[in-house]
Image (tube, grey):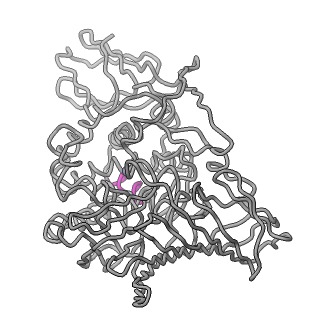
Amino acid sequence: MRRILYLIILLPTLSFTQSGLFQYKETFTKQDTLRGSITPEREWWNLQHYHLAVEVFPKTKTIKGSNTISFEVLKSAKKMQIDLQEPLQITKIIHHNSELAYTREGNVYWINFPKNLLPKTKEKITIYYEGKPIESQNPPWSGGITWRKDKNGTDFIATSNQGIGASIWWPNKDHSYDEPENGVLISVTVPEHLTNVSNGRLAKTEHNEKLKTKTFHWVVKNPINNYGVNLNIGDYSHFSEIYAGEKGNLDCNYWVLKHNLNKAKKQFKQGAMTLEAFEYWFGPYPFYEDSYKLVEAPYLGMEHQSSVTYGNKYANGYLGRDLSGTGIGLKFDFIIVHESGHEWFANNITNVDSADMWIHESFTAYSENLFVDYHFSTKEAEDYVIGTRKAIKNDIPIIGQYNVNNEGSGDMYYKGANMLHTLRQIIDNDDQWRNILRGLNKNFFHQQVTTEQIENYVSTKTKLDLSGFFDQYLRTVNIPTFEYQIKNNEVSFKFINTVPNFCIPVKVWINDKLTWLFTTTELKKIDFNENIKSFEIDRNFYIKPTKL
Ligand SMILES: [Zn+2]
């Protein structure tokens, strides 16, 4: 998820360098740096586990709880950074039965241990906090809590916090480079007539008849990104099925509002279809230990790990629309397919820095056409991904600014998808392409990665130097222009509007004969040995053909 936000982001000042590489400036604050970089106060400790225990009070729209953070000390230190956004407040921090001192700097808490913690030791602190968290104005694009009622007037509550960060509702190390290796226990207390659904598996429900509350304990065994942790509270019904997948039986659990049960039983058949298509292309579902879930939420949807939230109104398309304009987008439920695709790219392979969020969104936007390819046809898959080109803006580069929690252009969706689709054509071997997609998920299993790691992996596996290719599409806003001229038997061609080392083979049909033109920024000529009557460039390449 993440699309529409880009419509409201302020555009930075743009400028081009002589080489065509893009430079842009944006003003960032110290708070952005504290949020978006691996500060010394984060670096010295490695997350092991969170136990988040929180009570939700719908009447006052407040929450109160604690987070017990288990961590390993990597380097001797005594000052720790924990993030919790205003207006929530930490009330107490406990370490070995004594209270720790702390100070606040905006959304950052500086915790002071009385003396240095020793390397290789395992430590634990419990942070108590409370308050009235920010209410989301436009979920999931603006973060916070959504307090709604279902059509029977029952509370329907959810968290969403991609971008703004999980620290908008719970205290944690709010940076994607570090995930709790041993997962999370999420214990949520709500009024007794409500059910809470979070990530992982429901281990236990406790009913406190005196206080008229229920506490739901959800266990996540795998590492999880902060923004994936979520609460969904409502009058839920549950149904399930077993999907026989690559790693054995995967339990699929569906939680929907009671009055939507019949619609959900029909629409959520696409859950298993999605798993089947993506296990084929990407390898085993990455979280068998935590189950697969679709959970109805009071907003469109989000890739919450093992708890994909759904609000697409039980209809195909994107709120009934087809983003590609070809009609093919109406053949599947966009939210089930796209958000489940993120289980591989975002939840399994996570960006270290949000500037590299194309790793989440380009592959996942691309996964939509792989779903079509698997269940319908390659032709329709091509129509779909090519159709989405109309959404490309080429406003700012796909890669954002590092260390300040900044994301690049919304082109990380469909320009990214078309870049990957172009790469598939260049590789021209679907077995190899599929092995690369599966290899990424195996090689970087449950890891946080950089763009360079992805680039190097693909270049190594294809034995191609793709540095110019990735530079062009990820780091500039220019569409490579393929200039060509035909005279009798001869075709001349080159790329302009590219970085200097941009060179790819382009697939063309000359007099209906398939020909590859190895194209660089230098003018080349080939003699075709017969008069050229027709010349057609493969539409699957995201380039701009122009006659000289
Ligand atoms: Zn997405």
Q: Quadrant of residue 340?
A: bottom left
Which residue is at the front of the view, 112 or 72?
112
What percent of the width, then of the height, locates residue 39?
A: 71, 53
Using the image as rendered, state which of residue 280 and residue 32 is in the foreground. 32
Vertical relation: 341 (above or below) 181 = above
Part of the protein shown in magenta: 431-438
| Residue drawn at point x = 47 percent, y = 23 percent | 498
197 or 250: nearer the eye? Answer: 197
Q: Residue at x 71, y 76 (%)?
A: 94
Quarter of the image that includes the C terminus: top left
Label total for image: 0
Q: Residue furthest right?
A: 115
Say which quarter of the image contains residue 495: top left
Residue 409 or 519: which is nearer the viewer? 409
Looking at the image, is 546 positioned above or below residue 38? above
Relative to 321, say whether 193 is above or below. below
Asked whether residue 175 is drawn in magenta, I would say no
Q: Quadrant of residue 115?
A: bottom right
The residue at 56%/76% (across/down) is 51
| Left or right: where 117 falls relative to 260 | right
Residue 385, position as x, y percentages in the image: 27, 41
Residue 15 is left or right of residue 291, and the answer is: right
Residue in view at x 51 percent, y 61 percent: 132
Q: What secondary structure is the stretch in magenta mostly built from?
A: helix
59 vs 214: above or below = above
The location of residue 125, given as percent across then percent down, is 69, 75
Q: Position of residue 543 (x, y in %)?
A: 34, 27
